Image: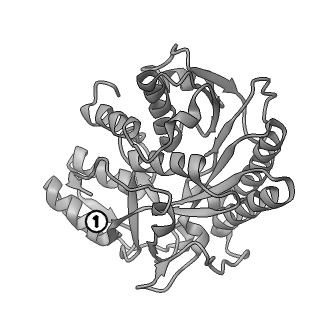
Amino acid sequence: MYGNKQFVEDMEYISNAEFIPWDKFNKKTVLITGATGLIGYTLVNSLVYTNKKRGLNLKILALVRDMDRARERFKDIDGDTALEYVLGTVEKLPEIAEKVDYIVHGASRTASKTFVNEPVETILTALKGTENLLELAKAKKVSGMVYLSSMEVYGYPEKGHKVTEDEIGALSPLDIRNSYPISKIQCESLCFAYAKEYGVPAMSARLTQTFGPGVNYNDGRIFAEFARCVIEKRDIVLKTKGETERSYLYTADAATAILTVLLKGKSGQAYNAANEDTYCSIAQMAEMVAKQGGIKVRYDIQDEAGNGYPKALYMDLDTEKLKTLGWHRGGGTLFGNDV
């Protein structure tokens, strides 16, 4: 990735973000779960990069399930003295002897089909993992912890409604796919409870769908399929009408948002993170990508619920609360358009 000009520019952008109080990381230790995922990968790389650039004497602990996969994933920075791997899972968190000053908890099941086919595991991974991280945060007396939540906690807002952090959607526990958003809501509630009862400075970042350099080629999300179609010169085939509307977020901006909340957020609070300028429907995105990529869009409408697809939703996130912390988006391009 360090041969990728865009990725290097992203690392520079993040390390130069002056609204992040980098000095708070001086001689500190940050634990990141979900480290090999897209957001975790961006965070780990950006912290290693910034540590070297700013001389922070920072240590990054990356919790990973598979050591070989982790070393391959981080081959560009593997061996950097600031990076240390912790082998284990959030469900069975290994003992961590080192001091831990900050935690970013990003480990989660993310594939829609998994929510339908493995709802028990989806729920228990979320709940057990978050409890374990909060207990660790409590024991280590951390200065900050951010739980990576999701826009899906809002359920199905009305079209044209701007969604703020003080509203949560009504989600039926009898809809199997809701194993994911309901468990996210419960984990946020757990973070709030630990903040109020034990004084753990835990916060939630409600991220919209995020992508950028580092996405696995076989990623199952819709934006990755669109990108593959362009690369492979295949027409985009939509299995729904593509009515869902949402905003998106570039990986570098997701990283700066999370770090801003971690260092400047208020304990027990939740913050939306999105690029509001990207708000569009899936069908509109498909047509835009197809036009730029010289391919076409075709429709093969299928049963949504049976395939794990969520119902059409209109998720226009309001990010003013995050902006009050000084955050603003500024990096990268999505599908070739400045966003």
Residue at x 75%, y 61% (from the top left corner):
192
Image quarter of the C terminus: bottom left
Please tell me how many numbered marks the rendered image carries.
1
Residue type at mark 1: give it: Met
Q: Is residue 319 left or right of residue 33?
A: left
Instruction: Name the foreground residue: 41 vs 306.
Output: 41
- Residue marked by disc 1: 285
Q: Position of residue 120 (x, y in %)?
A: 76, 57
Instruction: Name the foreground residue: 31 vs 154.
Output: 31
Q: Position of residue 41 (x, y in %)?
A: 49, 36
Q: Position of residue 66 (x, y in %)?
A: 63, 27
Above or below 257: residue 291: below
Q: Secondary structure at mark 1?
A: helix
Instruction: Name the foreground residue: 339 vs 244.
Output: 339
Residue at x 43%, y 53% (from the top left corner):
210
Q: Position of residue 77 (x, y in %)?
A: 46, 20
Above or below 291: residue 92: above
Above or below 248: residue 55: above
